[in-house]
Image (cartoon, coloured by chain):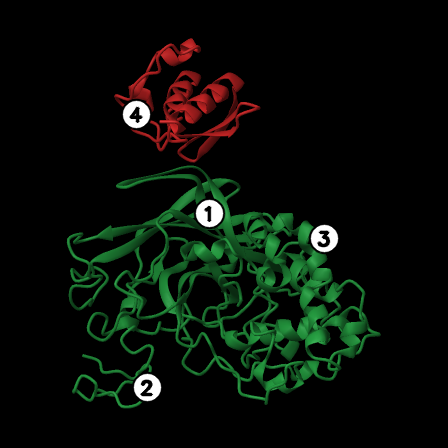
């Protein structure tokens, strides 16, 4: 997946496992940029009684590099703590949760957000409330309102939210991990099957999102709101990182954590660690900053997937199979940004330091007609110019690895005919997102998800149960 | 965070050998008998109590490299004698 459970070590630590990052000019407030870092992969909405939350013992960061050195210039830091009203019960909710301070919400989480510039940390706000998880129509009957109440405005003009949202990343997990199959193209696979529609494996799961909407003037290197797409100062790089304390001692009734914060997870571009970095180095990659990515350039220049595709799809990718040059196109997409002149009207180049960060040209306004394929689809406001919540990064990166972007840097190369047809066979769906901050949609609730199949009168009540159409009280 | 002294470190690190680590709240912990390093002789519970989550980790017995963590700090000490003594105590405790 994008970065869900992408490394052996971090897969065992979901609250610190970054799953997706997004960075885009806010469509409803284009003088701002929205930065989102998702954690806790594949939350099954019904996963109680201990529903999902951030780690109180994890330090979360959203980092912004505005001078191209792969080192954070501006960091938003988030630290959570949990408060339990009634430790004598096992229940997450003891009644209807109608507000963030509802007495019926037993296990609440709060957070502190600070901004770090030049090594100096300033606490922006403390004891900000996260919303509960979306339990169901009895405990959280008006979830959208609860979540909206958890959008906080900060003194510097930022909006911030931290809590459960619906998974925005859509992918056919069952097929891509079964020997790199996209179901619509599986008749060409070495183990042939009839073509089929893709299956959205993440359509009914949730994540935990940390989202902050920041004025552009707070992110650019000179404090201005960039208006010239060609100016180097218009580009920022963004990534998230999670840290745990270096030492932990566990006793039956007490746990002691101490020492420096040690990075255990990070994420810039989707699928970088997942698909590019080999298994033996994935957790190492998670532990180093983007400025240390020089050691991983070789995996971008000669990606394993590009070598595997011609084998798995015999005769389908002959040009890709014959291509042996280092992949300058992928280095640009993932590690340096596109210099001016490669894609007309676009650049997000950050210089010679290779670093896996999401590069956003803040001077490019939101698109009035977004294309899920982003820059590959002629939409310069989409991935890999940052990343919007709905961008089809799987299709973009699979096509790119398969050779679609090679001609941008090697004019003599002709992509194989199949490349332009590579598709997952589905999109994100109509109700997956919302049009306002934090843009990721209302999380699925546990009562209705997974949906009851067939007749739903098991309880004798005959209540109709379809996803998202349940009764509201 | 209170400044860590070598004396405090030696006291707490020594005490932690059986468990492999030392945590905060060290009041009333026993002192080592016949300690070859006299600095260990003086317990400093007031100072130790003020140190957040004190944990010592013998990283390399042969070089005497010991990591002392407290709060968000980590200090590396090199004391082959202390490390050897801790290792000896660890082996001894394993025989009990």
- Would you call the spot at circle 1 few (<14 residues within 10 Å), some (14-19), or many (20 or more)? some
- Please name the residue that numbered disc 1 is placed on: A243
Instruction: Identify whether B58 is placed above or below A208.
Output: above
Instruction: Identify whether A232 is placed above or below A402.
Output: above
Left or right: where does residue A320 sit relative to residue A3?
right
Q: CA distance from mark 1 to mark 4?
A: 27 Å
The answer as to whether the residues below labels 2 and 3 share one chain is: yes
Q: Secondary structure at mark 2?
A: loop
Q: Is residue A186 visible?
A: yes
Left or right: where does residue B47 sit relative to residue A195?
left
Q: Residue at x 44, y 26 (%)?
A: B91
Q: CA distance from mark 4 to mark 3?
A: 51 Å
Q: CA distance from mark 3 to mark 1?
A: 27 Å
| The color chain B is rendered in | red
Residue furthest out toward the front:
B95
The answer as to whether the residues below labels 2 and 4 share one chain is: no
- Nearer the N terminus, badge 2 or badge 1? 1
Q: In the image, residue A354 lies at what x, y percent?
A: 68, 54
Q: CA distance from mark 2 to mark 4?
A: 59 Å
- Please name the residue that numbered disc 2 is placed on: A453
- Nearer the N terminus, badge 3 or badge 1? 1
- Please name the residue that numbered disc 3 is placed on: A352
- Marks 2, 1: nearer the viewer: 2
- Marks 2, 4: nearer the viewer: 2
Q: Secondary structure at mark 1?
A: strand
- Please name the residue that numbered disc 4 is placed on: B26
Q: Is residue A221 visible?
A: no
Give the letter of the green chain: A
């Amino acid at each position: 997946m994008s970065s869900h459970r992408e490394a052996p070590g971090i897969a065992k630590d979901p609250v610190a496992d970054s799953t997706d990052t997004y960075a885009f000019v806010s469509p409803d407030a284009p003088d701002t940029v929205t930065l989102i870092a998702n954690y806790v992969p594949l939350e099954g909405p019904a996963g109680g009684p201990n529903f999902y939350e951030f780690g109180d013992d994890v330090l979360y960061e959203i980092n912004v590099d505005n001078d191209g050195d792969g080192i954070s210039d501006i960091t938003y830091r988030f630290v959570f703590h949990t408060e339990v009203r009634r430790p004598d019960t096992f229940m997450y909710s003891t009644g209807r949760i109608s507000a963030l301070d509802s007495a019926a919400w037993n296990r609440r989480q709060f957070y502190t957000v600070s901004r770090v510039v030049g090594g100096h940390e300033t606490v922006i706000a403390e004891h900000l409330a996260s919303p509960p998880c979306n339990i169901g129509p009895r405990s959280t009957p008006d979830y959208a309102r609860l979540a909206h109440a958890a959008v906080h405005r900060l003194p510097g003009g930022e909006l911030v939210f931290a809590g459960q949202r619906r998974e925005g990343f859509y992918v056919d997990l069952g097929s891509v991990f079964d020997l790199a199959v996209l179901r619509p193209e599986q008749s060409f696979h070495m183990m042939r099957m009839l073509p089929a529609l893709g299956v959205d494996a993440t359509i009914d799961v949730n994540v935990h999102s940390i989202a902050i909407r920041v004025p552009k003037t707070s992110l650019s290197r000179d404090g201005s709101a960039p208006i010239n797409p060609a100016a180097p100062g218009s580009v920022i790089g963004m990534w998230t990182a999670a840290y745990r304390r270096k030492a932990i001692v566990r006793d039956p009734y007490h746990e002691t954590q101490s020492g420096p914060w040690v990075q255990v997870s990070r994420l810039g571009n989707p699928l970088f660690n997942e698909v590019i970095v080999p298994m033996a180095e994935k957790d190492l990659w998670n532990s180093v900053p983007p400025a240390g990515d020089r050691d991983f350039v070789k995996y971008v220049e000669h990606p394993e997937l590009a070598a595997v595709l011609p084998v798995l799809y015999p005769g389908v990718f002959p040009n890709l199979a014959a291509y042996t040059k280092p992949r300058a196109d992928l280095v640009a997409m993932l590690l340096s940004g596109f210099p001016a002149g490669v894609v007309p009207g676009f650049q997000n180049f950050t210089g010679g330091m290779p670093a896996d960060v999401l590069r956003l040209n803040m001077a490019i306004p939101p698109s009035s007609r977004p294309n899920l394929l982003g820059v590959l689809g002629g939409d310069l406001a989409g991935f890999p110019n940052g990343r919007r919540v709905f961008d089809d990064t799987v299709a973009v990166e699979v096509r790119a690895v398969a050779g679609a972007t090679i001609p941008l840097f090697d004019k003599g190369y002709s992509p194989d005919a199949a490349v332009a047809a590579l598709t997952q066979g589905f999109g994100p769906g109509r109700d997956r997102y919302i049009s306002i901050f934090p843009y990721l949609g209302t999380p699925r609730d546990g009562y209705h998800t997974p949906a009851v199949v067939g007749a739903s009168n098991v309880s004798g009540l005959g209540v109709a149960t379809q996803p998202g159409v349940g009764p509201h009280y | 965070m209170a400044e860590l002294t070598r004396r405090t470190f030696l006291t707490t690190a020594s005490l932690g050998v059986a468990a492999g680590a030392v945590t905060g709240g060290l009041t009333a912990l026993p002192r080592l008998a016949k300690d070859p390093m006299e600095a260990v002789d003086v317990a400093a519970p007031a100072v130790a109590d003020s140190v957040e989550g004190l944990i010592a980790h013998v990283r390399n017995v042969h070089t005497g490299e010991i990591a002392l963590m407290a709060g968000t700090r980590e200090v590396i000490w090199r004391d082959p004698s202390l490390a050897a003594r801790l290792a000896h105590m660890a082996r001894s405790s394993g025989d009990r």
